[in-house]
Image: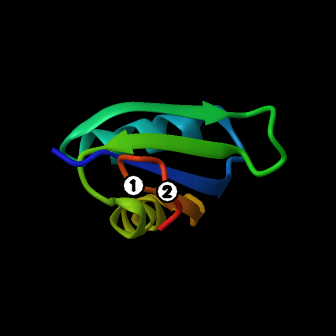
Amino acid sequence: MSRYITILSTIIESDSDTDLIALAIAGLKDISAWSIDLEDCDKVIRVVSAEDIGNEFCDKLALLGVKASVMEVFDKKYHLM
């Protein structure tokens, strides 16, 4: 099984936004880990998944009112795609 690490920048304005991010992640399959770095100026989300889910995740977040964009996607050997 492939493994991808997707790095996204977001605009998180409240605690409810982090709840919406968790909701969006719950709607995606094959997510093995994720985290949000609220200390970073880009409010970075890091997602480890079996597939490249970057664009799908951004679309789900947009539907929930959270702005996000894919910064980088790495493949299983952690090469920039």
Q: Quadrant of residue 16?
A: top right
Viewer-side residue, 11 vs 35: 35
Q: Circle 1 — which element? A: loop
- Whether residues under marks 2 and 1 lie with C-beta atoms below 8 angstroms apart, the answer is yes
Q: Could you classify mark 2 by the number of other residues whose Cα lies within 10 Å: few (under 14), some (14-19), or many (20 or more)?
A: few
Q: Which residue is mark 2?
A: 79
Q: Residue 38's spot in the image, x, y percent?
A: 73, 34
Which residue is depicted at the point 15% across and 44% down? 1
Q: Which residue is mark 1?
A: 75
On the rendered structure, is 78 left or right of 41? Answer: left
For badge 1, the amino acid type reads: Asp
Viewer-side residue, 74 vs 24: 74
Q: Tag on residue 7?
A: none
Label 2 vs label 1: CA separation?
A: 5 Å
Q: Residue 76's spot in the image, x, y percent?
A: 35, 47
Q: Circle 2 — which element? A: loop
On the rendered structure, is 1 left or right of 59? Answer: left
Which residue is depicted at the point 55% across and 36% down? 18
For badge 2, the amino acid type reads: His
